[in-house]
Amino acid sequence: MAMTATEPATAARPFGPAVALSCRECGERYDLGPRFACEFCFGPLEVAYEFGAVSRDTIAAGPNNIWRYAPLLPVPANVASLPNMNPGLTPLVRADRLAAELGLRSLHVKDDSGNPTHSFKDRVVAIAVEAARTFGFTTLSCSSTGNLAGAVGAAAARAGFRSCVFIPAGLEEGKVVMAAVYGGRVVAIDGNYDDVNRFCSELIGDPAGEDWGFVNVNLRPYYGEGSKTLAYEIAEQLGWRLPEQIVIPIASGSQLTKIDKGFRELVALGLVEDRPYKVFGAQATGCSPVARAWEQGHDVIQPVKPDTIAKSLAIGNPADGPYVLDICRRTGGAVAHVDDAAVVDSIGLLARTEGIFAETAGGVTTGVLRKLIAEGALDPAAETVVLNTGDGLKTLNAVDAGVTATIRPSLDAFKDAGLL
Ligand SMILES: *Cc1c(COP(=O)(O)O)cnc(C)c1O
């Protein structure tokens, strides 16, 4: 049901400054509801706002989590008092040693591994769970490449939802355990993520799925907004400045598009100076449909069958791929890919130089950063941010690291082993 612009907001304003859902393709507007696709052109819906006055000071005085940006998100003003995982405000690490190794003047790592379930996915789920509560869903669900399942399981436990999440069979043990430990159902589907996603769409269309809030399907417009908080935090942590270059991983592409949206909102609200920034997208070679389209100059993404250790990014048919291409083109960035050997090597480099143990997705962004510097596509003199979106403890099998030696508990044995 399309709405008119004059329709009043509800008294309670469960969605705060959000006023409508609007179609990214044709601009058609809809009531804020559990819908995700335009009825006219099937384009994806996104949240539209009428922001009130927001200042750096009111943000700085807010909670030490994403709710400091509540006036910019589709959540009620009292959201910080609700049962939620309260993610965010993760460190922006000044990475001088990695910068020196790569020949960069200024580099920061936005390290999202410290979120409650150890990936950036807590941000998107935090928003979606509030929408699920408002819409009266009783089961929280998702199609997941791994991290999302854990974030949904935890958020459902805390907020009092049933949960049932769907993952492709054969995920890393750390991700499966992380998803299951909170007591919800974890269903592995014999297929890849794109098969899981298709299955979930079927379930949503069936009466059996009526009370189900799929955070990344029928709640996707709300879910997506959680990624804006990465943009807000990076800008605030840089001293209310936009970085000049940023490297972002791509699975569905949602995160990349919403970080760009967040930067543009900060400029529009006068919270940061309007200066150009370049967005660089990162994929693993074994699942690089967006990077391939970029290389070939295509606007259409050709789906692929994923084959990479970067399982959290293994989406062969990325929903937001075309928008990623638009953003990287508009900002003067690029989309690039690195193979699994480079992913593993880059995990080691980041750990060795900065003490950050990234999951494979962080190896992908760090690897693409290195590659683009080597190719001259990234400016070594520009202020650069690279994202680490997950924790290496979830992808232990990707790295080959272990004890230096096993010895008897004696000083002689230690000396004999030549380790001094
Ligand atoms: C999900 C995920 C992403 C990005 O996902 P998008 O679908 O592109 O928003 C990046 N890193 C990790 C570790 C993830 O789990």
Image (tube, helix red, strand yellow):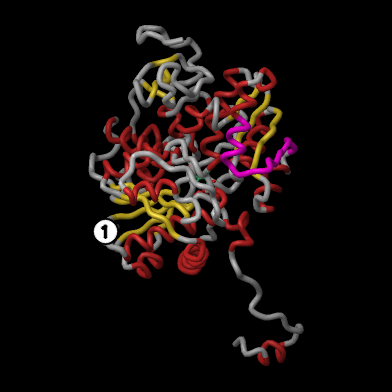
Three-letter amino acid code of the residue under disc 1: Asp
- Within 10 Å of disc 1 (Cα), the crowding (few <14, some 14-19, many 20+) is some
Q: Is residue 232 visible?
A: no
Residue 17's spot in the image, x, y percent? 41, 21
Above or below 341: residue 289: above
Q: Residue at x 48, y 53 (%)?
A: 388
Q: Is residue 45 visible?
A: yes
Above or below 2: residue 265: below
Residue 240's spot in the image, x, y percent? 32, 43
Residue 132's spot in the image, x, y percent? 59, 24
**Side of 190 relative to 355 (left or right):** right
- Residue underneath mark 1: 379
Please state the extent of the stretch shown in magenta in the rendering.
Answer: 183-200
Q: Residue at x 63, y 35 (%)?
A: 155
**Side of 35 relative to 418 (left or right):** left
**Side of 360 relative to 418 (left or right):** left
Q: Residue at x 26, y 33 (%)?
A: 270
